[in-house]
Image: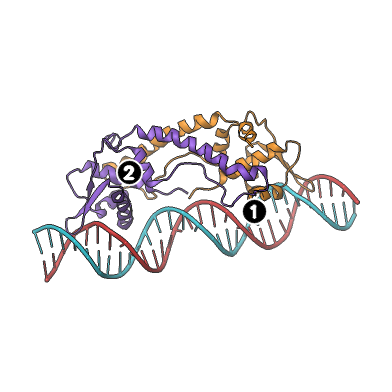
Chain colours: A purple, B orange, C cyan, D red
Amino acid sequence: MISGKFAITIHILTLLHKFPNDYLSSEFIAGSINLNPVLVRKEIANLKAHHVVESKEGKNGGTKLAVNAAELTLKQIFEMTFETIGLGFAKNQPNPDCPVGKNINQHLENLYSEMNQKVSLQLEGISLEDFSNQF
Amino acid sequence: MISGKFAITIHILTLLHKFPNDYLSSEFIAGSINLNPVLVRKEIANLKAHHVVESKEGKNGGTKLAVNAAELTLKQIFEMTFETIGLGFAKNQPNPDCPVGKNINQHLENLYSEMNQKVSLQLEGISLEDFSNQF
DNA sequence: TAAATTTGTAACATATTTTATTACAGTATG
DNA sequence: CATACTGTAATAAAATATGTTACAAATTTA
């Protein structure tokens, strides 16, 4: 299974970009994603930690973008929500007495690292503005 | 979370490649991966369905490669164990009355589809033999 | 032919991760 | 002061991944 963090975060950011002058409430955003507002606030907390959005408490409060959407890339959003991409590892430590078991994770990491470079290159070329303007 | 299917499968195939003349038992393979033999047999069942390995029941039975390792690419293995790569979707159906909610999944799919092409290109260039010869 | 070993598979159990819910303190608005 | 938000903790529920047990069927070998 793969968590919806990236998808949710980019959904939030797209909405914020569409309403650049408003503080959007987590309830409103949750209504578009069809998600519990608390989970929206959690993702917003992550975005705040990365200084991508700012929010205002209290009545008529909410969240708005704090950066230029043309300068925020999907790669940055990816890195805020995922560490890296990959095809996973076996859960348990493989047998260190086996030449294959001993080294497989290192070799997989190398493979995945190259995957990440390629994906990052793609995502670096797309800004939030680009993504949002598709709608 | 991400399942270990790909990692386990490539581990199995690497072992089979290292012992091209033997039928390896699921117990032996499980010992290298440090995994329950039943789970190994499940992945082998998948490989059998794709005609990549053959196995023999009964005493001294086990599994061996049924294809040329130089011609089996990591892309093929990837496709047997994952459908596609991507950064996920929100779990619930987004709001179809919202212009963003209505289209976000399609746009994400397009994005992921391009990611898959890039990753596939990479994995296509690596054979099981290449991977196994690193050890 | 009998004993031993191995696959194949089902059924069930446990662990982990992801998502949802409830609750409420704190903050700003009007 | 009433209202409507955020922020966050605590807990529950759902989904997925992994592990275990059990046993029939197949094959080898003694």
- Work out whether residue D22 or residue A13 is closer to the camera in this orientation and state it: A13
Secondary structure at numbered mark 2: helix
Q: Looking at the image, can residue A90 be seen? A: yes
Residue under label 1: B36
- Labels 1 and 2 in the same subunit: no
Residue under label 2: A10
**Picture layout, residue A15 above or below residue C20:** above
Whole-angstrom CA distance, mark 1 to mark 2, is: 39 Å
Quarter holding the C terminus of chain A is: top left
Residue B62: horizontal and vertical position, in percent? 73, 44
Residue at 23% from the left image edge and 50% from the top image edge: A54
Which amino acid type is shown beneath numbered disc 2?
Ile
Secondary structure at numbered mark 1: loop
Query: With D19 as the anchor, is A23 left or right in this view?
Result: left
Residue at 47% from the left image edge and 49% from the top image edge: A1
Residue A36: horizontal and vertical position, in percent? 32, 56
At label 1, counting other C-alpha atoms closer than 10 Å, the crowd grade (few under 14, some 14-19, many 20 or more) is: few
Which amino acid type is shown beneath numbered disc 1?
Asn
Query: With D16 as the anchor, is A100 left or right in this view?
Result: right
**Picture layout, residue A47 above or below residue B116:** below
Tag count = 2
